[in-house]
Image: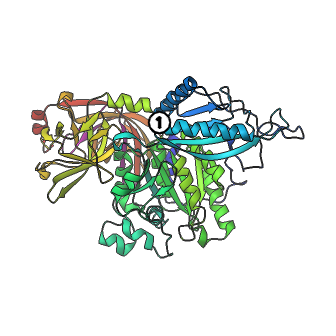
Amino acid sequence: MDSRVSELFGGCCRPGGGPAVGGTLKARGAGGSGGCGGPKGKKKNGRNRGGKANNPPYLPPEAEDGNIEYKLKLVNPSQYRFEHLVTQMKWRLQEGRGEAVYQIGVEDNGLLVGLAEEEMRASLKTLHRMAEKVGADITVLREREVDYDSDMPRKITEVLVRKVPDNQQFLDLRVAVLGNVDSGKSTLLGVLTQGELDNGRGRARLNLFRHLHEIQSGRTSSISFEILGFNSKGEVVNYSDSRTAEEICESSSKMITFIDLAGHHKYLHTTIFGLTSYCPDCALLLVSANTGIAGTTREHLGLALALKVPFFIVVSKVDLCAKTTVERTVRQLERVLKQPGCHKVPMLVTSEDDAVTAAQQFAQSPNVTPIFTLSSVSGESLDLLKVFLNILPPLTNSKEQEELMQQLTEFQVDEIYTVPEVGTVVGGTLSSGICREGDQLVVGPTDDGCFLELRVCSIQRNRSACRVLRAGQAATLALGDFDRALLRKGMVMVSPEMNPTICSVFEAEIVLLFHATTFRRGFQVTVHVGNVRQTAVVEKIHAKDKLRTGEKAVVRFRFLKHPEYLKVGAKLLFREGVTKGIGHVTDVQAITAGEAQANMGF
């Protein structure tokens, strides 16, 4: 992580600065499967009839891995060829965890050849037969004319193939929602998930609030979850046509789980916990068009960068501003994104074609940052965001998930509930392994460093019953009559075979992002490591007496209250007032339960 990201933390309370020189960037179809980008029917790959070159007539060569497949044509294949194509589609769907993108009219080396209308129609018919064979649907994302080395109009078609996963294992993407207070985060989520526009006075957000004081103030102070589904044809599934979350899950092939985080600075610890504990796939940073980069916007941006969470930006409330004000806000965002600490490539999305290109390039390059401008009241450009979320592929590949599933079970405890007639329920994310109903696990560490045995009675994902939980998925687990008083946030539930170790003292390599004076031995900070959140004291700074903003060092920390379960290599973030720092755990000093009891009261 570039230490210059500290500018975002140190300047979080300063005005965002003036507009940048130059205009906003438009989404371009250069690179990746998004190479077919551009307004429909206007720009053309290859050469135009006047002989003048436009975009190069190539995409990158087809990759062996991944969920993108190039096909020149699929006209009347033999039975043997058809079975081979079906097997190939199954592989691509597996790589994309239930989604695949087919580029029809493209050779394996990426050459954009195109097909005549009759050949394209026959190829799409074959593709539809292939999809039916594997239990999937196809959706044409976009078509584009090319006339490379041909006087006849030829087309390239980009098709999304989406399969309903077996055993209720629908594709689930977690999106953390960041942004300054009053930027419209909860309102936007209410509009997306309820299917009704806001009335301009916050009606859409009322169903998202969890506490009375949130309803009265209109400000989120806790973490809430909202779901938006897409069926196999790419159609939106939300509460406008489904009464319950169970119906949404049953009708959806893809689920977007929004993690609504607090925007006010006094709830920053809650926002950090949401980012570190719930393991979002990406983040949505909301910026109000009429205020621009203000309040905690820079700090939230810095957190996403520090934790290496990919993010896209939504500029809201465009109905309240003149067009020039919206453009000024976009230019301001562009200037911040291009700073050395960010080093991002902004892409302004203004059409459906741009949205498709942005979704594909966002997944392929960590530096691409799409920017949407919309209104939750008028609904302006809201459909572009839905297209983006529908097309957005998984940001982790199937191989990574398979490797995690081969490991022993480890479940992070993020929330604890007591449900009538069910008993104790814990919510969180399965970091590794597989968890099934009836599994015997151990949970800990307790305050005295012990791990306690328990049994998983039932599992729910997105409020629907689920028999098997796989690595990377979030769920709630019912523990029956297990005593809730023995549980706390930050614990882990693991396989007994893991023989988990605990520590009170650990070392981490850190970068001090911002500190008003000097960072010394004896300084106390709140440490966030995954779902662990506890106060720790700095025991030693190796090779240095003190640290200043932007400096790096290996630091030894000691937890003040109770031992924790940490793993070497885990990302770390610490804070205290305006002090911020990031890093990763380099060493843990394992202790036994007896040693933990002896250290209590330190």
Amino acid type for the residue under numbered disc 1: Val
The one of 562 and 517 positioned closer to us in this rendering:
562
Magenta stretch, residue numbers: 557-578
Can residue 427 be seen from the camera position used here?
Answer: yes
> Is 291 covered by the magenta stretch?
no
The one of 280 and 378 positioned closer to us in this rendering:
378
Mark 1 crowdedness (10 Å alpha carbons): few <14, some 14-19, many ≥20: some
Q: Is residue 516 left or right of residue 110?
A: left
Q: Position of residue 408 (x, y in %)?
A: 26, 30
Q: Is residue 98 left or right of residue 361?
A: left
Q: Secondary structure at mark 1?
A: loop
Please determine whether, in this image, residue 202 is positioned above or below residue 236: below
Please determine whether, in this image, residue 260 is positioned above or below residue 282: below
Q: What residue is pinned by disc 1? A: 134
Query: Hey, which residue is sitting farthest top in the picture?
Result: 80
Q: Position of residue 103 (x, y in %)?
A: 63, 36
Q: How many marks?
A: 1
Please determine whether, in this image, residue 180 is positioned above or below residue 465: below
Q: Is residue 480 left or right of residue 170?
A: left
Can residue 543 be seen from the camera position used here?
Answer: no
The one of 480 and 129 positioned closer to us in this rendering:
129
Residue visible at 62% across and 31% down in the picture: 70
Q: Image quadrant for the C terminus?
A: top left
Q: Is residue 306 left or right of residue 366?
A: left
Q: Position of residue 536 (x, y in %)?
A: 27, 44
Q: Position of residue 202 (x, y in %)?
A: 45, 73
The one of 590 and 137 positioned closer to us in this rendering:
137
